[in-house]
């Protein structure tokens, strides 16, 4: 259990204990008579009716009839009606508190009261009948006393409730403790706090405070350990499964943490892969540069050829560095303003004109089908480079005599223009389709080429440019052969 658990636990438990104690003390101060130990016989209307019925039955039918009546009406404890003979023995063997018995005899010897009854049975013996006081004293005036620390209330069959409409202020209600009125605590009675309800409330609040504290602190502890794991480099740690079926802010926080950890893991893995791929791509031209320099030193007559090779490798390295810088700027969100209107028809015409020169070298033709009215908001240079990378990739993989088709499908403002570039090459393996936009990824055919042209960054740059312009890019194989790459860009009014 962490510190947060104990803070929640003690805070809620203290709050519940304070509330319970405040309520108990308020009741204790407002109704002190209900918390006194009373020795007065019960004189509430149900008790008086019980005494009258039992006295009449004992006077006319005897002890056996009274015992049968009580066994039938009240079969078992608690039975608060006491029948005491002249020898202070209770008729049914119940224990009679000495103080309560003395108070009952005192009332019987004094003025007339209905709280006790003296009856002569048919056998000639005298009996004293009264109802034992409830444990905890009297309730409010005009009501049967409520037990604070005693058992359940003891009502008799057919007992009438207190007369309706009478309260403590009514003239017809006898005062507390007076003959015929509700019992009250005698002078000198000892007030006592309701300890049993307080202890029960404290135990219940203890359990619920512990459950609430555990419910709140456990997911926070899981999150803390997950953050420690991420800080130590273990980016595969997830916490959503540990949240169970929670549907609250802590569960949302756990899911957000999982998304953050997954994103970090993807970025870190991408950086590691990028570093590995860059090292691999730089190693080959550097090795060729060293070979050309060594050849020039060994054979001075081959210096011109060696210089040509050095220049070619330097150009390749410069292009690689430029592509890496472009990719890094795009991934870091440093592409600059992309809000200028760009006419796609003019942009595609310029790209296709340049691609036709390269297509002639590969013995393939490049065709353009584009309407004039198609405008997007963005950076013209970045868009030109993205489309050019896709078109050059299609030209490089087209067979001799093949055709590269560039088509623009215009849409209304609010929709998306589609730039479709298709070739007649070998296509891409289905397993490689989701990977062709990853940095440094090259298909099997490109890897098997004796002198691969490119570094696997062209489609990656195109993907980042399209994403920067709030568009989408996708690739799919053509059934008849070849690859189709589609760029979707949001359309705006011209």
Image (cartoon, helix red, strand yellow):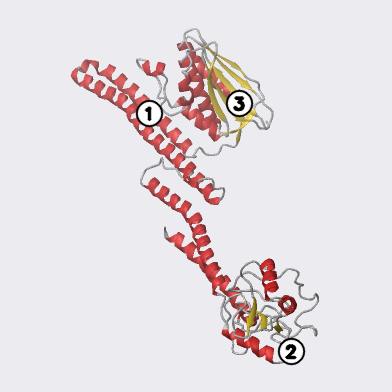
Q: Which residue shows up at 65% across the image and 88% down it?
A: 105
Task: Give me the C-alpha separation between circle 2 and circle 1.
Answer: 122 Å
Q: Determine which of the numbered discs, if any, sits on residue 318 in the image.
A: 1
Q: Is residue 297 above or below residue 99?
A: above
Residue 430, visible in the rendered structure: yes
Asked if labels 1 and 2 touch by Cβ distance under 8 angstroms, the answer is: no
For mark 2, what is the residue?
Answer: 112
**Residue 341 versus residue 124: which sits nearer the camera?**
124
- Whether residue 15 can be seen here: no
CB within 8 Å, label 2 to label 3: no
Q: Residue at x 49, y 60 (%)?
A: 210
Q: Secondary structure at mark 2?
A: loop
Mark 2 Cα shell of 10 Å, populated few (<14), some (14-19), many (≥20): few
Measured along the vertical axis of the image, is residue 20 above or below residue 96?
Answer: above
Marks 3/1: CA–CA distance: 29 Å
Label 3 neighbour load within 10 Å: few <14, some 14-19, many 20+: many
Q: Nearer the viewer, mark 2 or mark 1?
A: 2
- Where is residue 415 shown, x and y percent of the image? 66, 30
SS state under label 3: helix
Tag nearer the camera, 2 or 3: 2
- Residue 316, by quadrant, is top left
| Residue farthest along the bottom direction in this orientation | 110
- What residue is disc 3 on? 344
Helix, strand or loop status at disc 1: helix
Question: x and y percent of residue 88 in the render?
Answer: 59, 84
Q: Earlier in the sequence, mark 2 or mark 1?
A: 2
């Amino acid at each position: 259990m962490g510190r947060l658990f104990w803070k929640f636990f003690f805070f809620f438990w203290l709050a519940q204990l304070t509330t319970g104690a405040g309520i108990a003390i308020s009741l204790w101060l407002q109704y002190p008579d209900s918390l006194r130990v009373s020795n007065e016989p019960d004189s509430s209307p149900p008790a008086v009716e019980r005494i009258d019925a039992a006295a009449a039955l004992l006077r006319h039918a005897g002890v056996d009839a009274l015992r049968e009546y009580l066994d039938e009406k009240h079969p078992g404890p608690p039975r608060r009606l006491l029948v005491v003979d002249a020898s202070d023995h209770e008729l049914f063997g119940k224990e009679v508190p000495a103080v309560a018995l003395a108070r009952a005899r005192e009332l019987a010897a004094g003025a007339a009261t209905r709280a006790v009854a003296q009856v002569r049975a048919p056998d000639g013996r005298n009996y004293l009948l009264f109802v034992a006081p409830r444990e905890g004293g009297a309730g409010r005036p005009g009501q049967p006393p409520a037990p604070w620390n005693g058992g359940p209330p003891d009502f008799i069959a057919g007992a009438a409730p207190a007369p309706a409409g009478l309260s403590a202020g009514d003239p017809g209600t006898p005062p507390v403790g007076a003959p015929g009125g509700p019992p009250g605590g005698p002078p000198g009675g000892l007030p006592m706090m309701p300890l049993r309800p307080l202890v029960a409330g404290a135990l219940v609040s203890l359990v619920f405070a512990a459950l609430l504290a555990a419910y709140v602190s456990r997911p926070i502890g899981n999150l803390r350990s997950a953050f420690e794991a991420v800080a130590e480099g273990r980016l595969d740690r997830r916490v959503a499964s540990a949240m169970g079926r929670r549907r609250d802010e802590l569960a949302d926080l756990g899911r957000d943490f999982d998304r953050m950890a997954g994103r970090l893991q993807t970025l870190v893995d991408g950086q590691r892969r990028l570093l590995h791929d860059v090292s691999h791509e730089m190693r080959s031209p550097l090795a060729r540069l060293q070979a050309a320099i060594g050849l020039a030193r060994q054979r001075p007559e081959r210096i011109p050829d060696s210089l040509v090779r050095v220049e070619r490798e330097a150009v390749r390295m410069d292009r690689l560095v430029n592509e890496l810088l472009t990719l890094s700027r795009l991934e870091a969100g440093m592409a600059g303003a992309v809000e200028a209107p760009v006419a796609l028809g003019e942009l595609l015409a310029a790209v296709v004109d340049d691609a036709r020169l390269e297509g002639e070298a590969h013995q393939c033709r490049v065709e353009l089908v584009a309407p004039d009215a198609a405008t997007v908001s963005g950076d013209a240079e970045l868009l030109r480079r993205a489309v050019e990378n896709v078109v050059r990739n299609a030209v490089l993989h087209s067979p001799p005599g093949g055709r590269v088709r560039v088509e623009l499908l215009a849409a209304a403002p609010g929709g998306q223009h589609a730039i479709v570039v298709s070739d007649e090459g070998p296509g891409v393996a289905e397993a490689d389709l989701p990977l062709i936009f990853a940095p440094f990824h090259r298909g099997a055919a490109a890897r098997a080429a004796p002198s691969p042209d490119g570094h696997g960054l062209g489609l990656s740059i195109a993907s980042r440019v399209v994403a920067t312009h709030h568009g989408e890019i996708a690739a799919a194989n053509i059934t008849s052969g070849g690859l189709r790459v589609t760029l979707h860009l949001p359309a705006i009014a011209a």
